[in-house]
Every structure is written in C-alpha cells, then in structure tokens.
Image (tube, rainbow, N blue to C red):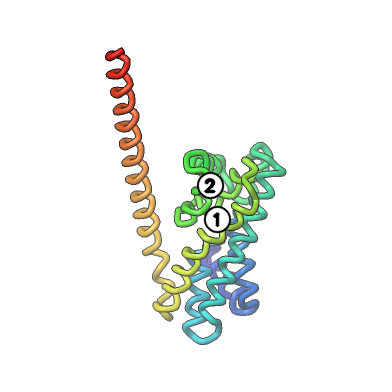
Amino acid sequence: MDFISWGIQLIKDLISSAGYIGIMILMALESACLPIPSEIVMPFAGWLAYDGVFSLTWVILAGTIGCVLGSIVSYAVGMYGGRAFILKYGKYILLRESHIKASERWFEKYGDLAIFASRLLPVVRTFISLPAGIAKMDFKKFVALTFLGCLPWCAMLAVIGYYLGENYDTIRNYFVWFEALVVIGLITVGVYYLVWRRKKKSSGESIRSVGEADK
C-alpha cells in the first residue's frame, strides 16, 4: 500500500471509529493548514450517512464546525506569529511561500469577502485564515464568514457522497474539474469587474475634463 492509500485508509478508519468527533478533527486539521483532503473526508462521511451509520445533517455540521475550529487556529498563528513565523515554520507542514502569497492576494483584493468566497477554491481555502490573522481582521466577523463559507462546501461534499453511495470514491476526479471551473469563473468575474471599473473611471475623467473646459 503506497503512502497516499495509507493516508486515505487512516482517514476512513478515524471517521469510522471516532464518528462525528473524527470528522470534526480531520476537517479542523485541514483548515489548520495540514494536508488533509476534505474531498475524501466529507464524501466518505456522507456515504456512511447513506449507509445509516450517521445523520447527514450532523455530518455537515461536524465538518463545518471542524473547519471553523481549524481556521481559528490558523487565524491565531497569523495574528500572533506573523508572516515571518509562518514562512519559517510552514515548510514543516508542506506550506510553501506560494500558498501564502496566493492567499494574501485574495485577502488584499477582496478583503472580508475573501474569507467567505475562497472556501470553494483549491489551496486558497485552506490558507486564507493566515492573512486574515496577520491583518487582525475582526474576530467575530471572521468566525461568522468562515462558518457561512464552509457550510456549503461541507454540505456539497457530504451530499454528493450520500447520493453516490458506494461509488463515493469516484468524486475526487470530478472535483479537480469542478475546482478548475470555479477558478475560471472567478477570474472571468474579476476581469469583467476590472474592465467595468476602468470604463467607469474613464467616463468620470471625461466628464471632469468637459466640466473644466466649460469653465
């Protein structure tokens, strides 16, 4: 059994033995920037709900609460450790500088909204809490937006695992394409917004120029 297969089996064993607490722990670890794939955790838990072991509602809530708890840990690391600390020790949990930069760009560009919207994005969703902590974002708002952003992600994965039943293993391949589509969609919206803003700015400058010429 290779390392990846071993890791997946470990995830399944923890969920099977620890129940909702296991789901919560694994999702907390992912949101605390550890390489735990939510695309394995939540669909497997959803399948166990399909099999009558769990309640689907509680699976979703356990996953979401876990995400929030792990995100709070990342937020605290960002707030108290700072960027230098993260870059120095992040390599030990496979956290690269490119991950930090991608998350920082999102947070700088979209501010508080990034905490909610980025939960559907690969890489960024895991690390977005770090720049929020570095920026000392309002904690209550951070927790609320994190919960609201993580809830649909956990629900979607769990529901897909539930309805696919024993075929839940096949969804990981589909989520690679799903995440790519989300990224393309967000880039398209971002480009449209920048073009619209530039046109609006140009229009405003033209109006001012006409007004100055009339004086």
Which residue appears at 56% of the width and 66% of the height? 64
Q: Nearer the viewer, residue 30 or 70?
A: 70
Residue at the extreme bottom of the image, as rendered: 52
146, above or below 104, in the image: below
- Kindly identify which numbered label has been placed on residue 145: 1
Measuring from the top left, give residue 23's x and y in whole percent: 59, 71
Q: CA distance from mark 1 to mark 2?
A: 8 Å
Q: Residues within 10 Å of mark 1 (few under 14, many from 20)?
A: some
Where in the figure is residue 46, as x and y percent of width and height?
49, 76
The residue carrying mark 2 is 112
Q: Amino acid at mark 2?
A: Asp
* Mark 2, secondary structure of its residue: helix
Could you tell me if the residues under marks 1 and 2 are in contact, i.e. CB atoms within 8 Å? yes
* Mark 1 or mark 2, earlier in chain: 2
Tell whether 73 sits left or right of 105: right
Q: Is residue 119 above or below residue 103?
A: below
- The residue under the point 56% across, 71% down is 61
Quarter of the image that includes the C terminus: top left
